[in-house]
Amino acid sequence: MGLEASTVNLHFEIIERCRHGDEAAQYELYRLYSKAMFNTAFRICGAREEAEDVLQESFLSAFKHIASYRAEASFGAWLKRIVVNKALSALKKNAREALMMEEVVDEHQYEVQNNDTPATIDVDRVRMAVMELPTGFRSVLSLYLFEGYDHKEISEILGISESTSKTQYKRAKDKLRSLLEKEVSHG
């Protein structure tokens, strides 16, 4: 328990230093949280470059608005909310480009899989199938399954009803199952 308290105090001190413009403290927060936040952005955006942009924008926004952080939730939860919002904004802004990129991925899917090992093929098939999901389905699935949000939280984040979140999650799972079954029958 002492270690946990000192970790909280360490983060509090780093956050306070960030509030005073300490770049070393900003780097420390980045080092502590960037990998997890990148993974969150990538799961929502689906493209490495977009996730990197979202990560950068999120940290810049967090540092700019760090005075508004009130420790009502953990810093990680506060930062994750920023990342999720930035990622969803990027999806909306780049919806047409994202659809075009998914079409390109679809065209090269079989070619890439034939060069992979069997263990990698399974992971790649799932990843590609997730990327084929409509944006709304993919967002709900990622937030629920990978990020651990419940449907009430997802409804608040996405501005949809809780029942819509549940419905989109179920449809996303069904569509994902269908896509994977189609892959197996054609593979």
Image (cartoon, rainbow, N blue to C red):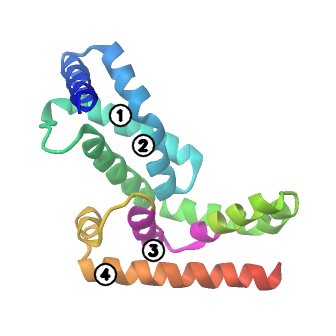
Q: Amino acid at mark 1?
A: Phe
Distance from disc 1 to disc 3, alpha carbons, whole Å, reads 26 Å
Q: Residue at x 22, y 65 (%)?
A: 156
Q: Residue furthest front?
A: 1
Nearest to the observer: residue 6 or residue 153: 6
Lower position in the chain sequence, tag 1 or tag 2: 2
Q: Judge whether 84 appears above or below 142 on screen.
A: above
Q: Which mark is residue 138?
A: none
The tag on residue 37 is 2
Q: Quadrant of residue 76?
A: top left
Residue drawn at the location 46% of the way across and 58% of the way down: 44
Amino acid, disc 2 = Met
Dot 4 falls on a residue whose secondary structure is helix
Q: Earlier in the sequence, mark 1 or mark 3?
A: 1
User: Are the residues flagged by discs 1 and 2 in contact, CB closer than 8 Å?
Assistant: yes
- Alpha-carbon span between mark 3 and mark 2: 21 Å
Identity of the amino acid at label 3? Phe
Which of the two residues, 174 or 5, is positioned nearer the viewer here?
5
Q: Quadrant of the C terminus?
A: bottom right
Please provide percent x and percent y for residue 141.
44, 69
Q: Which residues are magenta?
A: 129-145
Q: Within 10 angstroms of label 3, few (less than 14), some, or many (20 or more) residues?
A: many
Q: Earlier in the sequence, mark 3 or mark 2?
A: 2
Asked whether the residues under the numbered discs 4 and 2 touch, taking CB atoms below 8 Å apart as contact, a structural biologist would say no
Report the amino acid beneath label 4: Thr
- For disc 4, the neighbor class at 10 Å (few under 14, some 14 to 19, many from 20) is some
Among numbered discs 3 and 4, the one appearing first in the sequence: 3
Q: Which mark is residue 59?
A: 1
Rendering quarter of residue 5? top left
Q: Position of residue 108 (x, y in %)?
A: 79, 63
Give the residue at mark 3: 137
